[in-house]
Image (cartoon, rainbow, N blue to C red):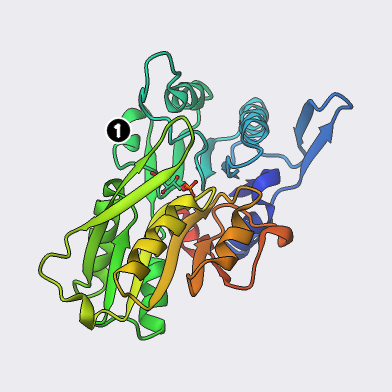
């Protein structure tokens, strides 16, 4: 089996290859003076099972194009099968028409991925559980929830003084699953709305806490698929603190940090942020309250099946 990692997932690719007792297949990427890329697979891949790893995060367009070129190069070189692992599927948030006149970006991405003729796709914590149904090709939807449950248990936070919170109603299923992994930990979901023109997030109510006495709750875990600007997490944290919850921790799969996010997050009342390496977090975006968990084992297990 050959593991080929694109530019956005080199670190995760090395870890994954290590877990599979191999090393990544070298890839030559030449960038022309005008920014166009030329991709070349150096090893022989004829009749080989190939796994391409490329997170389609910022710079999202470039990462998608590079993935398409790698897949094309593998196909032309006679690869037996191609599995694309896209730990973060860029453009997934625009999965329907929010306002008339918009493009449905996710549909464009799906059509293009399908046209590339890969055999299988592996993704992580997609924005909505409906996304896999929109594909007409095999897709495996993995999750980092088991890593979060493990971390909560390791810290001995798995008790009746803890509460799981989804920062919006869309994440309800995610925290229900996590609650099941943690002996039915209490959970609630914030009723959030976002101004589509300004991006401003508002949240003033939590659903699901009707039968819980908040006096017994010492800590809350906000669980979400991604952090981009940090606005959602900050708004949720403020609401939880207003309700008297002393400690707030955040568990998020994709650290799609916009430029100002790390500063905002470090300054917030959150005690610690746990994210995964589905999106590579460069040194300049890391901050003291941040801890990165790896999804390499989860991908390796799936590939070994
Ligand atoms: C939204 O529905 C997502 O699940 C995230 O909550 C959102 O994308 C986070 O974005 P930001 O950090 O910019 O608030």
Q: Residue furthest right?
A: 33
> Is residue 130 shown to the viewer in this render?
yes
**The C terminus: image quadrant:** bottom left
List x then y, in percent, for residue 106: 44, 28
Q: Quadrant of residue 174?
A: bottom left
List x then y, in percent, for residue 282: 70, 57
Of residue 22 and residue 8, the one placed in the foreground of this image is 8
Say left or right for 188 vs 251: left
The residue lying at 48 percent from left, 51 percent from top is 231
List x then y, in percent, for residue 83: 51, 40
Q: Which residue is mark 1?
A: 133
Of residue 197 and residue 105, the one placed in the foreground of this image is 197
The residue lying at 34 percent from left, 72 percent from top is 220
Of residue 292 and residue 246, the one placed in the foreground of this image is 246
List x then y, in percent, for residue 39: 75, 32
Say left or right for 69 vs 129: right
Of residue 277 and residue 236, the one placed in the foreground of this image is 236
Q: Is residue 121 above or below residue 268?
A: above
The residue lying at 37 percent from left, 35 percent from top is 138
The residue lying at 62 percent from left, 59 percent from top is 262
């Amino acid at each position: 089996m050959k593991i080929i990692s694109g530019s956005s997932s080199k670190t995760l690719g090395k870890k994954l290859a290590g877990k599979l007792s191999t090393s990544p297949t070298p890839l030559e990427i030449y960038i022309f003076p005008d920014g166009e890329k030329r991709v070349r697979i150096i090893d022989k891949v004829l009749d080989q099972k190939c796994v391409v790893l490329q997170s389609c995060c910022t710079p999202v367009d470039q990462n998608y194009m590079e993935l398409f070129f790698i897949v094309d190069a593998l196909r032309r070189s006679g690869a037996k099968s191609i599995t694309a692992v896209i730990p973060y599927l860029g453009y997934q948030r625009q999965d329907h028409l929010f306002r008339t006149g918009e493009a449905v970006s996710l549909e464009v991405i799906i059509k293009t991925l399908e046209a590339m003729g890969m055999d299988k796709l592996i993704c992580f914590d997609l924005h909505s559980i409906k996304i896999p149904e929109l594909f007409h090709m095999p897709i495996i939807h993995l999750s980092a929830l088991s890593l979060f449950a493990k971390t909560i248990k390791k810290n001995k936070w798995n008790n009746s003084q803890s509460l799981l919170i989804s920062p919006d109603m869309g994440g309800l299923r995610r925290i229900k699953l996590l609650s099941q992994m943690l002996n039915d930990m209490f959970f609630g979901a914030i009723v959030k709305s976002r101004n589509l023109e300004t991006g401003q997030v508002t949240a003033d109510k939590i659903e699901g806490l009707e039968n819980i006495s908040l006096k017994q709750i010492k800590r809350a875990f906000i669980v979400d698929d991604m952090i981009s600007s940090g606005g959602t997490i900050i708004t949720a944290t403020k609401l939880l603190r207003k309700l008297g919850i002393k400690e707030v921790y955040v568990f998020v799969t994709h650290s799609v940090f916009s430029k100002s996010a790390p500063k905002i997050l470090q300054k917030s009342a959150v005690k610690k942020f746990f994210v995964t390496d589905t999106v590579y977090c460069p040194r300049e975006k890391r901050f003291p309250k941040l801890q990165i968990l790896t999804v390499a084992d989860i991908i390796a297990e799936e590939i070994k099946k």
